[in-house]
Image (spheres, rainbow, N blue to C red):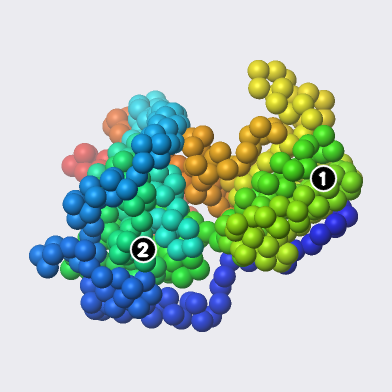
Amino acid sequence: MKILKQGKIRTIADEKEVRAIVSDIIDDVRERGDEAVFEYSVKFDGFRPQSDETASPFRVPKETIEEAYKHVTEIEMNDLKRALANLRAFAEAQRGTLTEVRNFQPEPGIFLGDKVIPVDSCLCYVPGGRFPLFSSALMLITPAKVAGVKRICSCSPISPLTGTIEYKTLVAMDMAGADEIYAVGGAQAVAAFAYGTDSIEPVDVIVGPGNKYTAEAKRQVYGQVGIDFVAGPSEVLIIADENADATTVAADMLAQSEHDPNAKAILITTSEGFGRRVSFEIEKELMILRTAHIATPSWNDNGEILIADNIAEAVEYTNKIAPEHLEVNLKGVESIFGAELPDGLEVLKELRNYGSLFIGKYTAEVFGDYASGTNHTLPTVRAARYTGGVWVGMFLKVMTDQYMTAAAAASISPAVNRMAFSEGLEGHAIAASRRFLADEK
């Protein structure tokens, strides 16, 4: 693998200072509740309560949500509705694949089963820092709603322009089906929803991206609540050959770079000439891109262009990197739908570590960010080796059950008795045979 441009090695932020700050915030929220949440919100976000004194100072009142709709244009509403419809349709299709097992018999008389049920409550954390990511509200709340979660909470830091959550984010939260919306963010929000305060009832699961303090807070409260994963800055990896369009690939790489100065965009190509053309197009677009103040340091520090000897090498490297977003832009790749993989593209079968895959020159990663129907809340920094992104199953529990006839219990009891004794657990061994001794009395 030849390196045309190399970026810095990234890891999830794990600084001692961040860990200590977040730990102190969590402890403070647990001890002082709403008072601590309020103080941190004022300190970090300039928060002022929107509710009356009898309600939660952080919960967004119905009137504010209704007012937000007045600030969203008809075109914007139609865009939100289209994205929501696609997300809901795909989440429903995913939910349909999770069927329950009933009356399975590994042996005669042993009946095993399971049921798939939603968690009781969740928090969908929507970032609200550099950009108002209203699309994340749709991505997080929709699968929870389809899963059947009874109490869906959503929160986001306030917008300094409005004094509450950004208008489109509020509308997206409401449209997607949030039952409770709170104007609070950061580590203090994670702590509040994990442990509860006087005005915030705790939840069972917390999902959603955020800055390094929010991510660290999720890490520290895991166990008290479930979480999706600890996410870092966004990333994309593109596998392309000389047949791809350099301007399109450059645009896709900068689309990731503008997320954050720590975002990462990687191109792996078998053509050095193509790699150089993409580099040229990136530099050219950075001269006119309005978000160049973010995208430029991101590209300069973290961007990579690698020249592979062949596609197989590109695939091997990709599986090692396990990118959040993966684009495959190779000649003939579109023909895989409705036909066997063409020669040279069997490699698609070998790609196994990624958050979400985008196939072909027409399939922009940004389509998945907003409206195509897959979820954009995805694992980063190699976490795709062991987990996928947020989906309807993240809000569901698979709970097993079993029933045995007397004959089946009598048949399996001696084996369990012997196994328990072998492990030194006499109480287990006795429990395995006790009911039959009782029957004999």
Q: Percent from the top left, x then y, of residue 421?
A: 43, 55
- Say which element carries label 2: loop
Give whichever of 423, 335 is nearer the camera.
Answer: 335
Residue 269, numbered label:
1
Q: Could you tell me the amino acid type at mark 2? A: Leu
Disc 1 vs disc 2: which is toward the camera?
A: 2
Q: Is residue 146 rendered to the left or right of residue 374?
A: left
Quadrant holding the C terminus: top left
Q: Could you tell me the amino acid type at mark 1? A: Thr
Q: CA distance from mark 1 to mark 2?
A: 44 Å
Residue 78, numbered label:
none
Give whichever of 51, 20 is nearer the camera.
Answer: 51
Q: Which residue is outermost to the front?
A: 288
Q: What residue do we see at 31% from left, 41% from top?
A: 175
**According to the image, label 2 marks what residue?**
161
Q: What residue do we see at 39% from left, 70% from top?
A: 187
Camera sees residue 326: yes
**137, above or below 30, in the image:** above
Crowd class of label 1 (few under 14; some 14 to 19; many from 20; radius 10 Å)? many
Give whichever of 271, 110 is nearer the camera.
Answer: 271
Q: Earlier in the sequence, mark 1 or mark 2?
A: 2
Camera sees residue 395: no
Mark 1 vs 2: CB contact within 8 A? no
Q: Percent from the top left, x then y, of residue 82?
A: 42, 32
Q: Is residue 317 rendered to the left or right of residue 84?
A: right
Q: Percent from the top left, x then y, of residue 103?
A: 35, 26
